[in-house]
Amino acid sequence: MPPARVALFVTCLVDLLYPEVGEASAALLRHAGADVAFPAAQTCCGQPQLNSGFVDDARRLARGTLRAFEGFDAVVAPSGSCAAMLRVSYPHLFAGESEEPRARDLAGRTFELTEYLVDHLGVDRLQGRWEGRVTYHDACHGLRELGVRAQGRQLLSGIDGLELVEMARPDACCGFGGTFSVRLPEVAVAMADDKAAQIDATGAGTVVAGDAGCLMHMAGRLTRSGSDVAAMHVASLLASAAGLESAAT
Amino acid sequence: MDADAFLARARSGLAGVAAPPLPGTRPPTPASGDGRLFDRFAEELEKAGGTARWVNRQDLSAEVYELAIEMGAAAAVVSDDVDEFRERIDRGLADAGCAVGPVSREAAAAADLGVTGAVAGVCSTGSVLLRAAPASPRIASLLPPAHVAILHEAVLVPGFEELFDVLGEQLLEANAAVLVTGPSRTSDIELTLVRGVHGPKRMTALVVREE
Amino acid sequence: MTAGEERAGTFAELAHVQLEKPGLRRAIGSAMDRFVVNRANAFAGADLEAMRAAGEAIRAHTVARLDVYLAQFAEAAEARGTKVFFAADGAEAVEYVRGVVRGHGATRVAKGKSMASEEIGLNHALEADGVDVVETDLGEYIVQVAHEPPSHIIVPAIHKTRQDVAELFNDVHHTDLPADPPELTRFARELLRDRFLSADVGITGVNFAVADAGAVVIVTNEGNGRMCSTLPKVHVALMGMERIVPSFRELAVMLPLLTGSATGQRVTAYLNVIGGPRGPDDVDGPDEVHVVILDNGRSRLLGTEYRSVLHCIRCGACQNVCPVYRQVGGHGYGAVYGGPIGAVLTPLLDGFERAGDLPYASSLCAACTDVCPVRIPLHEHLLSLRRDVARERAGAAERSAFRTWSAVWSRPWSYRLAARLGRAGQVVFARGGRIRRAPFPLSRWTSGRDLPPIASRTFRERWKRTRRGSRNGAPDGR
């Protein structure tokens, strides 16, 4: 069977701030047998605009996204919230508009990274090594809109030397919430401190999540408060553990 | 606002809104019956902080006597709705030195114990259904610090479905009803459970079995 | 309009105040955790999803035929001697109740818990008439004595420790009570018992009105609902117009959903069913029963996409899982209804001028939607409200900023250019691989957190470099 034609939807945060996460994602997908492409026309899914109530602006960005991903079997993002934006929000965003059929079509073939690796590419276990205690944060949209919860944990559990411990409330929101983190910074920081205390209680040296927004927010607070805890994207940790090169073949 | 005008406002808001149907069947809930009767009733009432006893008719007065002694009850009010059990209840209370008066607000407020009947017992929750009627004053189960409800095992129903299916009918013969489950309680201070707030602090159900 | 008082501040302002209260977060957080556990225990072994689906269907059906059921209720209730009053708004409801109280020459009122009464400012209005109004639910009594609004739908004094309560009672009543819940409760029981026995009028809320029976159902654990609806000569029950079920049948599902979600109980200690005033031969019971049915902005929602907000059964489960509520409590919202349901309902009832900031008081995590026993899509409503608020009230600067942002980012070339410009510009701010201080609006981020700088090579730049000379993967070579 020919490998699936997968378009990497890298997301604006990863593209601009965490490019290594994009490379790790591509490497993981390739390692699992997918034929990975990066349609360069992609920019941003429009979530910040929608999040702030500017629906027309969100649609404008979304149209570009619809165009960028035409023709691929699957669109995979290292982000539950961006994948959910396409899979759950785009059909509503274009309800009654001429783009609706294309939005529904794209929605039906968009996935979050760990979900795609485990549920669609059949990755049961990733061979790799990574020493340390890690705790996993469930990013909200991936969890509640896509049902992604077990997959990342499954992949992490399979890594030799990695000790995965659960914090008290792994599914509690970290306080990023997109524009929320800037509109209500005090509350957002208090929520990050709540997560930091939970992470502390586990003794983990690293918190792992599948969303760059969450990581940016948690990491930003952790470093500002002088913590030693590192925040890593699940793709980066897995690719590193598996010794995957990020260079294209 | 005039009723018609008020309802017209609602109606116009709902113009063109299709009402989905009510569910055809009710899903089971934690308050649904599980086939057991008294055993479950007793289990649930104990969990709620009350006590349930299964009593033979001829042992009823002894049972009441023991309860009254245990509570140190000097005065009690008894609802007329205990009817067929009345004599035995009166005897038990008299033997315990507990004075019984007619149910009035003053008597109920001063009593240590209120004894009432119940028109149903719900096994899934350990609850008893009391109906407000001339023979069943509400205050008998409300004002005294202890409440004993006496009911026939034949009026036990498995769960909420059976209760609510007959509640409408029950209410045709009464102006009010109350489903009582154990003693009154609160967790309003630091979520710490405290029993005995505005209603009784102690609640016992005596289920009289048929011989 | 939810009460005549102005909101005490914006969410941001109130949150700031709340975040500085020692112990508050701890108290609220541990109470919320307990509620979550209680709820899970309550529904263990049950098919909760089937219950929620049935709950949603029952509420959706009922609200979609609300006029029919309210008419049926009024007819059945009036046939039993209950007086039914339809109040278009809070002012009408208050006037009616004041009239009932005045008409009986009443000077003492005993009150059971009613969020609707808070909504319309009933207590203040009666007190201004010189009527003594005592809240009889222990938590409500505590906040009444403290002159504070309730901070949670189910547990109004959740923000107070036992020490707080002891100090409060001792201060107000000149007692020497220990910080012991049973002792404090015993004191309140005795004090409030006198008030029940001497009250002229009892005022309660309603959990569910039953349309075909013309009855109202009130659930309590304390017994104060029974007291207020039995002892005084007059009982007034206040309900939002949407709090109705077609028949008792539906309560077999709705009540376990309510009590399981609210307190983690299968059933509360008392489930009061009030069918009407006392009969001529009854020993006790009120001579008069009044049911006040309140609109106050609700009917305006019926024909809108927000209709499902009226499905709410006021269980408080959404508050118990809200990570924002966890940090600020009910008082952070500055409104009668707080937490997720409050953030949705308040702007809809009070308008955007007063409460347009509330839909933004959320990170849209959707935990609320996940627990709602009747499946109200709260997080979707929050998002829709933001759209409505932005349309009506977004400032020119913000609107234009977002428009520019989407214009620049919707074309790959301008997106790339913006990234390069940002990267050049950030040199001033980036130190040691982090940005600790950034210009507005990112200053709001950097006040409490570091920011990563734009990467020296973005993902697409790296990808392009490693693919130089070959197709970059799109099917048509784009």
Image (cartoon, coloured by chain):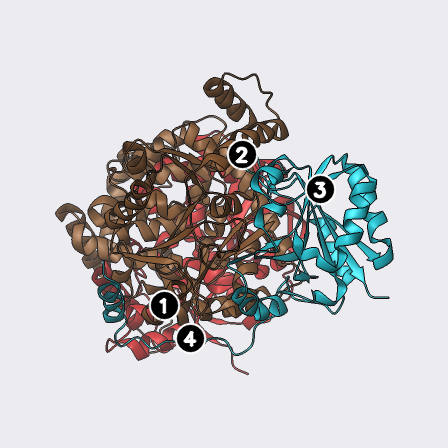
Chain colours: A red, B cyan, C brown
Q: Secondary structure at mark 4?
A: loop
1 vs 4, front mark: 1
Where in the figure is residue C9, as x and y percent of width and height? 27, 35
Left or right, residue B166 beside residue B152: left
Q: Which residue is mark 2?
A: C193
For the residue carrying disc 4, how many other residues have a C-alpha within 10 Å: few (<14), some (14-19), or many (20+)? some
Q: Nearer the viewer, residue C386 or C261?
A: C261
- Under mark 4, the amino acid is Gly
Quadrant location, the C terminus of chain C:
bottom left
Left or right, residue B196 beside residue A64: right
Left or right, residue B152 beside residue C429: right
- Residue B153 figure quarter: bottom right
> Do the CB atoms of the residues marked 4 and 2 lie less than 8 Å apart?
no
Q: Which residue is mark 1?
A: C75
Where in the figure is residue C293, as x and y percent of width and height? 33, 56
Q: Earlier in the sequence, mark 2 or mark 1?
A: 1
Q: Which residue is mark 4?
A: A108
Say the numbered circle drawn on residue B100: 3
3 vs 4, front mark: 3
For the residue carrying disc 1, how many other residues have a C-alpha within 10 Å: few (<14), some (14-19), or many (20+)? some
Q: Is residue C266 above or below residue C196?
A: below
3 vs 2, front mark: 3
- Under mark 2, the amino acid is Arg
1 vs 3, front mark: 3
Q: Residue at horizontal 64%, vertical 53%?
A: C41
Q: Are marks 1 and 3 on the same chain?
A: no
Report in which chain the residue with disc 4 lies: A
